[in-house]
Image (cartoon, rainbow, N blue to C red):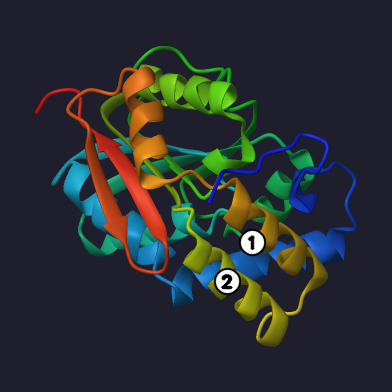
Amino acid sequence: MQREFSEAQPELMDLPNQDESSLRSDLENIARLNLSFGGRRAVERIYDDLGDKTGSQVLIDIAAGYGDHGRNLLRRAQTQGKNLTVVAVDFQMQTLQIARQATPSTEKMFFVQADARQLPFRDKAADLAFCSLALHHFDDRDAVSVLREMARIGRRGTACIDLARSRLAWICIWLLTTFIIRDPMVRHDGRISSRRAFSLSEMKSLAHLAGWPNLKQIKFFWFQQAVVARPSA
């Protein structure tokens, strides 16, 4: 199954000036899918592996969307006795506003509007740089730019989690969005995402092109994958 990517057919959540209630519903549905189909657990597993066992750390969450991963990691860090700060980055201001509204003011989570291909942070600005379920929104060239920016700002480690393209994944997502989740935006974007996603070999190749050191690839259940790098093994 070949990758199908066209800038002429964007995912609806990438378009500006969406109906706010529809966009909020879409983001909440994605958060529920992350919880139900292992996306949250995948991010937790990688955070536990890369994160400092003690002390303070800063994590930049690129294309953070609803911010559910960041909020979950903040709660996880608190229970583990860690001092974590999350910087949630997204290109869409409307999405950031919804994420901010969903985040208690007491949380150490900050919101920055920026392009993932050209992040406004100095080199090694964060301990960790994560990106979840967003790389497939870019063509191959821009995806490499995103991964290079992650490597530039992540001092202790970088991780990119995304869908893994396959015909079976497309069929399962089609069935899920036909019979279980019928939200129009989720249906449209989910089906496009399954065709835009990178294969396992493509994802690894992109990370190599971006210069990720000590690269490791992980395959998760429910058609998800991750590439993980640690600057010093």
Amino acid carrying mark 1 in the image: Ala
Q: Is residue 216 left or right of residue 84?
A: left
Quarter of the picture holding the C terminus: top left
Q: Residue furthest top?
A: 123
Q: Residue furthest left?
A: 233
Which residue is at the front of the view, 161 or 199? 199
The residue at the point 56 percent across, 53 percent down is: 67
Amino acid carrying mark 2 in the image: Ile
Res. 50 visible in picture: yes
| Residue 19, disc | none
Q: Decide: is 214 above or below 28.
A: above
Res. 66 visible in picture: no
Kindly report which numbered mark, 1 or 2, lies closer to the viewer in this rendering: 2
Q: Is residue 63 left or right of residue 94?
A: left
Instruction: Count all numbered tags in the image, as a single digit.
Output: 2
Q: Residues within 10 Å of mark 2 (few under 14, many from 20)?
A: few
The percent position of residue 37, horizontal first and vertical second, equals 44, 73
The residue at the point 79 percent across, 59 percent down is: 23
The residue at the point 18 percent across, 48 percent down is: 49
The percent position of residue 92, horizontal first and vertical second, equals 74, 39
Cα distance, mark 1 to mark 2? 32 Å
Q: Residues within 10 Å of mark 1 (few under 14, many from 20)?
A: some
The percent position of residue 39, horizontal first and vertical second, equals 42, 63
Labels 1 and 2 touching (C-beta < 8 A)? no
Per the image, the residue denoted by label 2 is 171
Q: Is residue 97 left or right of residue 202?
A: right
Q: Residue furthest bottom?
A: 179
| Residue 102, disc | 1
Query: Can you tell which quarter of the image residue 150 is in?
Result: top left
Q: Decide: is 142 above or below 218.
A: above
